Structures are given as C-alpha cells and as structure tokens.
C-alpha cells in the first residue's frame, strides 16, 4: 500500500512537472521565433538577479511549515506569512535601490527601467498564501501538481500573447508580472479560501529563525553556486551568446529541477516524518533509492544522447550553438541529481548545515575554475568546468551522509558507470540511425561561439 501511494505521488509530481516543462518549452520555442537572442540575454540577467535577491533573504519559511509539527496551525503559518510579507516589502525596496548600480555594472541602460518594474514581483510573492507548503506537509501532491500545471498554462498564454503584440523585452517583463499576479491570487484557493491575518508569535518566530539560519546560509551559497556562470558570463561574453547559453541551461536545469521537486515534495517530508531510529532509515530507503536512480539513469542517458536534436528541430540557425552546449550541460545533470537527493536526506534529518557546505564546495570550484578556463582555454573549457561543478557538491554531501550513517557511495559509483556506458551506447545507436550528428559535425555547432 505504501509503495502504491509512493508510485502515485511520483507519477503526479513527475507528470505535472513534465506537462509544466512542456508548456514552458513550447513557450520558449515560440518566443525564440518572435524575439531576438539578445533579449533572452538581458532577461537572463534580470531573472538571475531577481532570484538572487529572493534567495539572499531566504529564512526557509516554506521548509519551516513542512518540518515543524505546528506548521499547519493558524498561529504558525500566519506568523510565517507575516514574515514573508515583510520580506517582500524589503526586497522591493532593495531592488529599487540597486537598479542604477546594477545597470552601470552591466553597462545596460535598459536595466535602469526594467529592474524597478520587475521588482513588483517581490511584493506579489510576499503576499502568496502559505497553503502550498501546508499541502506539501501533508504530501497532497495532486493538488500542488494541478496548480503548477494551471500556472504554467497561464504563463504560456500571457507571454506568447504579449510577444505577439509587442516583440520586445517588455513582453517578457510584463508576462512575468501578470503570471505572478495570477499565481498569488490563485494560491488563496489552493486548499480552501481562508482568511490569513497578520500575526507575530514570538515562539514561532524564534523557531523559524532557528531553523532558517542555515537555510539562509545555504540559500545564499546555493544562489551563487547556481548562478555564478550567468553573472560572470554577462560581463565576459556578448548578450546574444549569453541568451543562447541561457536556453541551453534552461533545458539542462529541467532535469535537476524535477529531482529537486521530487526531493522537496516527497523525500524531504518522508524523511522528516520518519519516526523510527535513524539507523533504520538507510535500509528502509536504499532499495527504493536504487530503483529510482536506475530508472533515472536509463531516462537521462537517452536525453543526453538526443539533446542536441531538440535544438536543431525547434530552433532556427541563430541558436545552433546551443546544440553544442546542451549535451555537455545535460551530462553534468547526473551529479546534480545525486546531490539533490542527498540534500533532501540532510534536510529531512534537520541537518541543513550540510547543504550550505555542499553548495559552498561547488561555488569555490566555479569561482576558481570558470574564469581560469575561459581566459586560458576558451568558452568550451569553461562549459566543461560548469558541467562537472555538481560533482564537488556531491562529494561534500557524500562525506556528510557518511558521518550521519546515510552513505550510498558504492551504489552511486556503480550507477555512474552504468550511466556513462548508457550515454555512449545510445549516442552510437542514434548516430547509426541518422538521428544525431557525428562528432565532427557536433563540434561545428559550437563554431558560432568563436565566430
């Protein structure tokens, strides 16, 4: 019965994610036809900075609701909601103050106009209902899944309609604002329409801050580790190439985001609710973890082997360099998957400090290796450095899991070998079938980077 329930939950999580990402992919393809590559480059900077400002003030409000035994009680989630509103107001003010300095740093006059307008998103997300986290706590993934598909569909319609009306950067800016407005309004009807109220309980504030201090540290480092490449490339390469790279990263990030979603909605709550002795946790999940990763290895290996075909089929020649970038980035998603799974275990047992340490290891690798690779060996070397960055995150988490008696190192080494063999096997098969290009032609796809 438990396994059936788990299978049903995974189906809803993966299915809704697949539909949502399919809608986003369709939107991205249509927008790529309507808009110039440099617009995606500008928006990549805007979204990266917006995400950064959000994460740099993250105290784990959602994680608190999920992990705290009182998280679904009105006093607790109203206190969390109040903190979230205050945070949104502060982020809005910070974004307004930073607009001019950021525009000067990236030498883009457009950012002076875009950032103050996009900062409205902070106000909107600040008022979002915590009902999503309450559903997550009770593992009601079906409702969350349907909600996410609805928002993805709305976002697709809004962005495409605006791009048809005005094929400029403002279609992307106002598309984000309108979609976020609808998401915030709809969040109050996720469970049932309930009136939230401003509430500050000192007991709950202390609990949130106590749990959230390491979530905050982890979020800061996580943002920098996930986005250092974008922020660094924005200063070092043309916006057109940055936009193409952003498209390749969007595809490769989909895999990691799916596993992150499964980890946040299923693994983290289940580990947090595990009532038995921790020594029994590893044997209880080892078999299920192995089966999940075997399926993932088979599926991801096919995706990696075919990934450049997606760019060639759906995008025009302006984006052909992404066909070279995508297989490299997609292969590195394997380490992201292992790391995300390990991180969910650490959060589930209340050890959020390990997540911060792992992201710091990844960040240090990127800060040191990416500039050196770009300066001395070029963009391709920097791309490979980025692709293996999550390996250092995984190494750190593996050590932490070993200390906590939750090591799966032998299992992971065997799975890595299987994954590598499967990628080569599928690639060779698809080459023989004429579905993908040979190695020499694939290298030519990247010629635009230097051209």
Image (spheres, grey):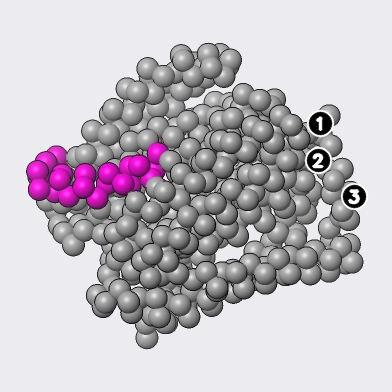
Q: Residues within 10 Å of mark 3 (few under 14, many from 20)?
A: few
Residue closest to the eye, 194 or 200: 200
Q: In the rendered picture of this protein, how many numbered marks are placed on residues?
A: 3
Q: 265 above or below 369?
A: below
Q: Is residue 197 magenta?
A: yes
Residue 23 appears in the picture as rendered: no
Quadrant holding the N terminus: bottom left
Q: Which residue is mark 1?
A: 450
Residue shown at the point (63%, 54%) measured from the top left: 332
Indicate yes or no whether the magenta region holds residue 290. no
Q: Which residue is mark 2?
A: 446
Q: Residue at x 53, y 17 (%)?
A: 105
Write the start and end of the magenta stretch as one range. Answer: 196-220
User: Neighbour class for label 1 at 10 Å: few (<14), some, many (≥20)?
Assistant: few
Please, which residue is most extreme toward the left here? 202
Disc 2 residue crowd, few under 14, some 14–19, many 20+, Cα 10 Å = some
Residue carrying label 3: 440
């Amino acid at each position: 019965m438990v396994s059936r329930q788990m299978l049903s939950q995974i189906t809803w999580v993966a299915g809704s994610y697949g539909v949502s990402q399919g809608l986003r992919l369709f939107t991205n393809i249509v927008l790529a036809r309507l808009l110039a590559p440099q617009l995606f480059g500008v928006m990549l900077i805007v979204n990266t900075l917006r995400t950064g400002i959000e994460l740099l003030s993250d105290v784990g409000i959602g994680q608190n609701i999920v992990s705290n035994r009182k998280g679904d009680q009105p006093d607790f989630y109203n206190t969390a909601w109040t903190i979230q509103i205050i945070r949104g107001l502060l982020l809005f003010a910070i974004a307004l103050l930073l607009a001019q300095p950021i525009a000067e740093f990236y030498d883009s006059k457009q950012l002076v106009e875009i950032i103050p307008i996009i900062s409205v998103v902070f106000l909107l997300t600040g008022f979002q209902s915590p009902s999503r986290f309450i559903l997550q706590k009770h593992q009601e993934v079906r409702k969350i899944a349907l909600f996410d598909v609805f928002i993805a569909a709305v976002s697709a319609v809004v962005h495409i309609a605006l791009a048809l009306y005005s094929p400029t950067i403002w279609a992307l800016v106002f598309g984000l604002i309108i979609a976020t407005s609808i998401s915030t309004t709809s969040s109050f009807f996720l469970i049932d329409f309930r009136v939230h109220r401003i509430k500050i309980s000192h007991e709950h504030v202390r609990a949130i801050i106590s749990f959230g201090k390491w979530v905050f540290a982890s979020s800061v480092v996580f943002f920098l580790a996930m986005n250092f490449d974008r922020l660094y490339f924005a200063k070092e390469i043309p916006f057109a190439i940055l936009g193409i790279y952003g498209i390749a990263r969007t595809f490769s990030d989909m895999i990691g985001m799916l596993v992150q979603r499964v980890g946040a909605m299923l693994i983290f709550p289940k580990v947090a609710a595990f009532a038995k002795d921790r020594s029994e946790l590893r044997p209880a999940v080892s078999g299920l973890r192995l089966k999940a990763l075997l399926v993932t290895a088979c599926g991801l290996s096919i995706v990696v082997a075919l990934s450049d075909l997606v760019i060639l089929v759906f995008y025009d020649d302006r984006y052909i360099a992404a066909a070279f970038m995508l297989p490299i980035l997609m292969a590195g998603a394997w380490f992201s998957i292992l790391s995300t799974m390990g991180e969910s275990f650490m959060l589930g047992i209340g050890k959020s400090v390990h997540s911060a340490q792992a992201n710091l290891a990844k960040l240090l690798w990127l800060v040191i290796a990416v500039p050196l690779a770009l300066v001395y060996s070029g963009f391709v070397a920097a791309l490979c450095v980025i692709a293996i960055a999550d390996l250092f995150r995984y190494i750190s988490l593996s050590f932490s899991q070993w200390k906590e008696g939750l090591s799966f190192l032998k299992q992971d080494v065997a799975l890595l070998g299987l994954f590598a063999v499967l990628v080569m096997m599928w690639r060779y098969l698809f080459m023989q079938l004429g579905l993908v290009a040979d190695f020499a032609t694939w290298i030519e796809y990247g010629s635009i980077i230097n051209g």
